[in-house]
Amino acid sequence: MGISASELIVPFAGAIQAAFSVLLTIAFGVAAAQFNLLSVSAAKEVSKLCVRMFLPALLIYKIGSNLHQETGVRYVPVLSEYHSHYRRK
């Protein structure tokens, strides 16, 4: 009663695609640093922008597709912690 190879192909392909996109993003960052396309201060600002704006937007987008009236209560602690963390800064 094992798992067939066809059941593993789709998740494996998805994992490879996700890993490749992360590695490609890192490679672009390294290339930008090597060719002095970004200053150190600009790189720090881009990093802040990604962490403070794009990452929460991605999380909300991904969670939003799974958010229903019955399951919404599960996300209240996460959102309240996120809100209190950035309110302290």
Image: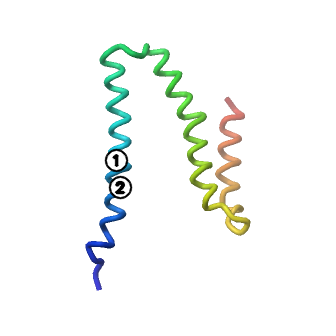
Number of other residues with Cα within 10 Å of mark 1, as a class: few under 14, some 14 to 19, many 20 or more: few
Secondary structure state at the residue bearing disc 2: helix
Say whether marks 1 and 2 touch (CB < 8 Å).
Answer: yes
Element type at mark 1: helix
Front position in the image: 2 or 35:
35
Relative side of 59 to 15, left or right: right
Question: Is residue 55 or residue 89 the one in the foreground?
Answer: 55
The residue depicted at 53 percent of the width and 33 percent of the height is 50
| Picture residue at 56% right of the left edge, 45% below the top | 58
Q: Is residue 29 left or right of residue 65?
A: left
Q: Which residue is mark 2?
A: 15
Residue 86's quadrant in the figure?
top right
* Type of amino acid under label 2: Ala
**Where's residue 81, x and y in %?**
67, 46
Total number of numbered labels? 2
| Identity of the residue drawn at 70% across and 61% down | 72
Which residue bears the numbered disc 1?
19
Q: CA distance from mark 1 to mark 2?
A: 6 Å
Q: Amino acid at mark 1?
A: Ala
Q: Position of residue 71 (x, y in %)?
A: 67, 66
Q: Nearer the viewer, residue 10 or 51?
A: 10
**Image quarter in which the N terminus is found:** bottom left
Up the image or down, 13 lies above or below 53; here it is below
